[in-house]
Image (cartoon, coloured by chain):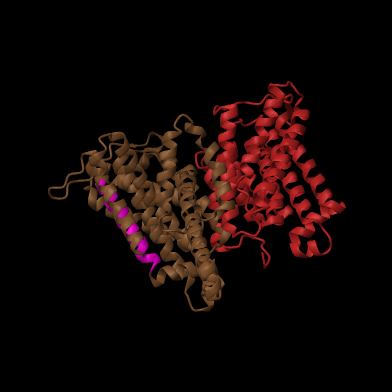
Chain colours: A brown, B red
Amino acid sequence: MSKIQKIVILVLILFAIVFPLISNNDYFIHIMTLSFIWMIGVYGLNLLAGYTGYLSLAHAGFFAIGAYSLGLLTVKAEMNFWPALFLSLVITGVIGFFAGLISLRTKEHFFAIYTLCVGYIIYLVIDKWDSLTEGVRGLIGIPAPANIGPLAFETLQSHYYLVLFFLLLVVLIMYRIVHSLSGRTYIAIRNSEDLAQTIGISTMKNKLTVFVISTVIAGLSGALYASFVRFIGPDIGSIAIVFDFLTYLLVGGIGTLSGPIVGTLLIVVLSQRLQFLQDYRMLVFGPVLTLLIIFYPRGIVGAVAAWGQKRKTLVHNANIKVKNLPEKQVKEG
Amino acid sequence: MEILIQQLFNGLTIGSVYSLVALGLTLVYGILHIPNFAHGALYMMGGYITLTMMTKYGLHYWIAIFISILAVGLLGVLMERFVFHPLREAPPIHDKIAAIGILLFLEAFAQFVWGAEFQSMPTPYGQVVEILGLTFTMQRLLIVIAAIVVMILLTLFLKKTYTGSTIIAMSQNREGANLVGINTNKVAMLTFMISGGLAAIAASLSAPINLVFPGMGQLVILKAFVIIILGGMGSVPGAILGGYILGFTESLGATYISNDYKDIIAFVLLVIILSVKPTGLFSKGGH
C-alpha cells in the first residue's frame, strides 16, 4: 500500500467515525448504516464472484438465512443477541458448506443457474414455511443488540458504530485474505482453474473455503440487517436483492477491494436522489449495469486504476524518450 | 381417474408453454454459449405487446400475436447486436451480468409503461368443449396444438432449409461454420430473432389462462433453465422433452403432493440432477 492510499483510508475512517457527530440528521445516519450493511454483503459476494470467478446468485438466500436465524433465535427462542449472532453465522456457514459442496462441482453457467435455483428454493421455503418463519406476515419485534458491559446499542448512533465496526472488520479480513497466499490462490483459480490444478492447487478445497467465508459474510450482513431494521419479510431473500448486490459490486468494481464501498455508497445515495423514480430506478441502473460490463468491466475503481496506470506508463515512456535523446537536443527542446 | 386425466392434460398445457420458452433459450445457448437471463423478460414483453395490440388497437388475437413475434424478435436482435456481440470475447461472467442488466431494465420498463397491476388478456377461444366426457377450455387445447405446430415448423426449418442448417452448423462448431463461409453474425442475429419470437408465442398463448404482469417471466425462465439442463444445454429435442416432463411433474405434484410447494419441484429436480451429474443430463463431452 502506498503512503497516499494509507492517508486516504485513514481520512475515510475518521470521516466515518465523526459522521454521526457532524450530521444531526437521523435520516442520513439511518441510510449510512443501511449502506454499511449492504457493503458487508457485497464484500461477501465480491470474494466469490470477483476474486474466485464464481458468480453466485444465491447470496440473497444466505443473507436471508442470516437474518432469519438471528430473528428466530432472538424472538422465538429468546436468546441474547450476541450468542444468537454467533449461532446465526454458524448456521449460515453450515448451510453454505453443504450448498457449496454440491454447487461447486458445477462450473460457469451451470454454477450461476444452480445457485439461482438454490436462492429461489431458500426464498420459497422461507415464504411457505408459515409455522417457523411466519411466512408473508414477516418476523416482527427483533430486539436491538444487547449491551456489552456499559456499551448499549439502543440509539441510532450507537448502532451506526456497531455496524461500522463490523464493516471495518470485514474489510480488514478481506484485505488480509486477498493479499495472502490463499488470496493469490483464489485469483489463480479465477484466471484458469485448469492451470491452477496443474500447479498443485486443490481447487475444490479452496473454492469451498471461499464459498463458506462468502456465505458467512452474507449471513453477517443479514443478521445485522435484521437487528437494525427490526422487521424482516421473505422479500429479503428474493432474487431482486442479489441483483442489487450485483449492481453495487459492478458499479464499484468487481474484484477490487474498494469497489463494494464505492459502488454501494454511490448507488444508495443516487437512489435517494432518484427517489421519485422508486420502482423505476432499474430503468436507469439496468442499462448502467449492461453498459458498465461492456465498457468498464472492472467498474469505477477499475477504470480509475487503469487510467492511473496509463498515465504512469505515459510519463514513464516520456522519460525514456527524453533520456534517450542526445544531450544537445534535450537542452534545445 | 378423471382427476388424473384432467391433470395430465393440464401438465400437457403447461409443458407446451415451458417447451416453447426453453426452445428459445436452448437455441441461443447452442449458438453463443450464454445463458440468456433476459429471456424471461422477452417472454414478458411478448405478453404485454399482444395485450396492447388487442385492447388498445382492437386487433384480432392472431394478428396481435404476429406483431408481438416481430417486435420481440427485433428486441432479441437488438440485444444480440448491442450487448452480446461486443461481449463475445469477454469472460463468461460478463454475459450473464449484462443479461441481468437487460432483464432489470425490461421489467422496470414494463412496469413504467403498463403499470404493476395484473392484467388479464381476452381471448376469442374462451368456449368450453367436451371430449369423451372431459371438459376442456378451447384456449388450453389451442396452446397444446399451436405449440406442437410451432415445434414441427421449427424442426423442419432447422433440418430441411439451408438457413436452418447454418444455425445447427454454428452450434456444432463456430470456427468451422465461419470457415465454410457461414456469416456467423447473421446467424447469431437470426437465432435471437427466432428465440424472441418463440418467447412471444409462448407468452401470448399462455397469457389468457394466466395473467400479464411485469414479473410474469421470472418463474418461467427459471424453469426453462431447469429444462435445458435436464435436456442438455443447446439440444432442441431435449428442450421439448424436458418441457413436457416438467409440466407433467408439476401438475401431478400439485395434485398429489402439495399445491403450495409445486413451484419448488422444478428446482429440487435440478438440484438433484446437478448433484449427480454436474454437467447436466444428456451432456456430451466438450461443451
Foreground residue, A248 or B135?
A248
Tell me the residue at 55%/53% (across/down). A296
* Quadrant including the C terminus of chain A: bottom right
Q: In this picture, which residue range is highlighted in magenta? A: A161-179
Which residue is at a point 54% across and 58% down the rendered structure image?
A111
Q: Is residue B259 magenta?
A: no
Q: Is residue B177 above or below residue B198?
A: below
Query: Can residue A28 be seen here?
Result: yes
For this orientation, the residue located farthest to the left is: A150
B84 to the left or right of A182: right
Instruction: Determine whether A194 is above or below B221 in the image.
Output: below
Quadrant in the rendering for residue B199:
top right
Prevailing SS of the magenta stretch? helix
Q: Position of residue B145 (x, y in %)?
A: 77, 38
Is B192 in front, or is A275? A275
Q: Position of residue A41 (x, y in %)?
A: 39, 51
Q: Is residue B77 left or right of residue B107?
A: right
Quadrant (top left/top right/bottom left/bottom right) for the N terminus of chain A:
bottom left
Which quarter of the figure has residue A18?
top left
The image shows residue A291 at horizontal and vertical percentages of 58, 47
Residue A171 colored in magenta in the image: yes
Q: Which of the two residues, A227 or B151, is positioned nearer the viewer here?
A: A227
How many marks the image carries: the answer is 0
Answer yes or no: is residue B173 visible: no
Looking at the picture, tell me which residue is in the foreground, B95 or A125: B95
Residue B40 percent coordinates (x, y): 62, 42
Above or below, A85 relative to B54: below
